[in-house]
Image (spheres, rainbow, N blue to C red):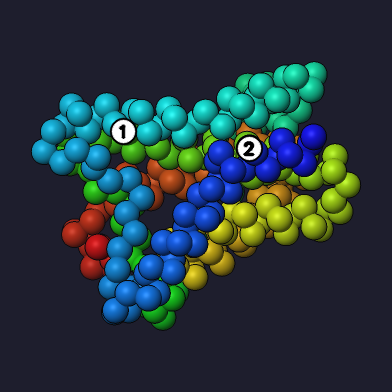
Amino acid sequence: MLRDETLIVLALSLGASGVSALISFVGSVTRPGALKNQAATLVGSAAPGRPWLDLAWQVFDVASALVPVLLVAHLLTREGVGLRAIGFDLSRPRRDLGRGAVVAAVIGGTGLAFYLGVRAAGFNLTVVPESLPAVWWRIPILIASAVQNAVLEEVIVVGYLLRRLGQLGWTPAAALAASAVLRGSYHLYQGVGGFVGNMIMGVVFVLLYRRWGRVGPLVAAHALIDTVAFVGYALLAGKVGWLPTG
């Protein structure tokens, strides 16, 4: 039952995203032209020219993406432990945020350098973090999307998956590999660099989770990394020469 439950949760969330990313990657590599001349947009307009309808779609997308997290919360509560078992609670907010900020500073900087390098080498698409219209809700939606990404990925790919794989008898090394490969898989639409870079990040995050016993710092780190990427791109795109634009 635990095996089937895990497969269903992944099929409803990031496992399905991994399959979608693979199909997208195949389409990109079989399309004429270099990968770096193609763009992968992370947060785009859902209704161009219709800002209120666009906002409704953006809010819907953020909210619906968090439903698998509610499912995991329900399953862990039925198990008798709840999200506290994986360290996703408000019992240590300052420590979680402090640790997350340090991790974000280290991974964010190295991640940007890695992306620029692999894109220049032709192994990655040009990542466009956002292409929203310049309206009042642009920045709030970008921050909400960053937090949503962080909560969804760290709760499911680290906390929940490692707990279930451990209960299923997987070795720590095998569980780490599964988590890291899964994280890389749903970033494959960005190219080989997106896959490898996020797989490395996945290894680091699993090791930190095992050290701290909490996904809270990982959620904080991920949210900060994505917020800086989304908002930074919105503010700097087209204004600095070193930042590729789609």
**Seen in the image, is 80 located left or right of residue 63?**
right
Quadrant in the rendering for residue 138: top left
**Residue 58, x across and y down, in percent:** 31, 33
- Please tell me whether mark 1 sits on a helix, a strand or a loop: helix
* Residue in the picture at 32% in, 54% down: 41
| Quadrant where the N terminus is found in the figure | top right
Could you say which is closer to the camera, residue 44 or residue 85? 44
- Please tell me whether mark 2 sits on a helix, a strand or a loop: helix
Quadrant in the rendering for residue 101: top right
Quadrant in the rendering for residue 239: bottom left
Instruction: Give the Cα distance between marks 1 and 2.
Output: 23 Å
Is there any visible trace of residue 7 in the rendered image? yes
* Residue in the picture at 70% in, 25% down: 75
**Residue 173, x across and y down, in percent:** 81, 58
Q: Nearer the viewer, mark 1 or mark 2?
A: 2
Quick check: 82 above or below 116?
Answer: above
Picture disc at residue 58: 1
Quick check: 224 above or below 34?
Answer: above
Q: Which of marks 1 and 2 is nearer the N terminus?
A: 2
Could you say which is closer to the camera, residue 133 or residue 49? 49
| Quadrant where the C terminus is found in the figure | bottom left
**Residue 97, x across and y down, in percent:** 57, 34
* Residue in the picture at 40% in, 42% down: 227
- Label count reads 2
Q: Would you say the residues marked 1 and 2 are in contact, meaning their CB atoms lie under 8 Å apart? A: no
